[in-house]
Image (tube, grey):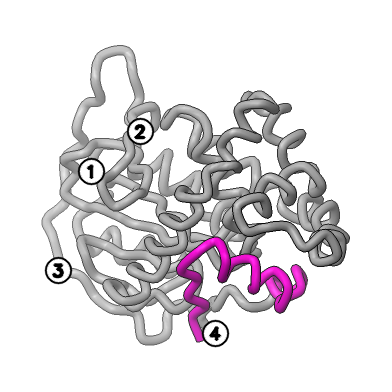
Amino acid sequence: MQTKLFTPGRLLLALIALPLALGLTACGKKDDAGSGAATVAAGAPLNAVPPPAGKAWSDVVSVTPEGGYVMGNPNAPIKVIEFGSLTCPHCAEFEEKGYPHLRDDYVAKGTVSLEFRNFVRDPYDTTMAMLVRCGSPDSFFALTEQVYTNQKAIFDQLQPVGPKLQAANLPPDQIFKAIGEQGGLIDFFAARGIAKDQGAQCLAKSDAATKLANDTSKAGDTYNVTGTPTFIVNGKNVEVATWDALEPILKQAGAR
């Protein structure tokens, strides 16, 4: 069942109620990545679209009105949205096995765009989502990739944080900064270009956490996102969770 978190207060309650280990097992990967996959309209093979002068399409990143970050040709005929959780190992698996192909073989041609929307499931996830968004749009995908690459080490550092914060009984508007400081996340991002003061300021913005939670709830209602990763292709939930299952759908739509 999808976890819906609406406010920082409820996120704090989730921290108390759910151990971090839940993030290792509950991100909702489909049992059979190809089973029940939705189809998209067939399309003729698409011709590559040249990127702006002096750039690759992977360098073109902007923030969308829906709170996502889109990479590539904004007018690409095939638009992919990924709903991902930064504490989900199945999302990390896609990042390792699928994301490089999607970026280099499809987004790079200008025929496919990739929009990533954070689907937050717990306060740790929310804290990291706030930090990957703390820099410029150009840094978002690189920071997200760094989180997934180092996910196990991050989990190891975060493991003892929950009991300490429960004992501290902090107000909700301080919980994310405390996770960042005590869980080593501020240091992690400082080593990757987000200064410590900058990271702390981002984590103090409880309205940003509320928006992430509300966007997660909206995703469930709008696209029937019940687990992560979930992929939307041209507005349709294609009901797959792996690159091996997603790539044929892109090809069916005309990507080559």
The residue that mark 4 highlights is 31
Q: CA distance from mark 3 to mark 2?
A: 26 Å
Q: Residues within 10 Å of mark 3 (few under 14, many from 20)?
A: few
Q: Is residue 14 left or right of residue 239?
A: right
Are the residues at dot 4 and dot 1 in contact (C-beta closer than 8 Å)? no
Q: Is residue 76 left or right of residue 37?
A: left
Are the residues at dot 3 and dot 2 in contact (C-beta closer than 8 Å)? no
Q: Is residue 148 visible?
A: no
Q: CA distance from mark 3 to mark 4?
A: 25 Å
The residue that mark 2 highlights is 61
Q: Is residue 158 visible?
A: yes
Marked residue nearer the N-terminal end (4 or 1): 4
Between 63 and 94, which is closer to the camera in this rendering? 63
Q: CA distance from mark 4 to mark 1?
A: 30 Å
Instruction: Please give the label number shown on residue 176.
Output: none
Between 95 and 136, which is closer to the camera in this rendering? 136
The residue that mark 1 highlights is 111
Q: Is residue 248 above or below residue 205?
A: below
Are the residues at dot 3 and dot 1 in contact (C-beta closer than 8 Å)? no
Q: Residue at x 66, y 26 (%)?
A: 197
Closer mark to the observer between disc 3 and disc 2: 2
At which x and y percent is residue 245? 42, 69
Q: Is residue 231 left or right of residue 88?
A: left
Closer mark to the observer between disc 1 and disc 2: 2
Marked residue nearer the N-terminal end (3 or 2): 3
The residue that mark 3 highlights is 41
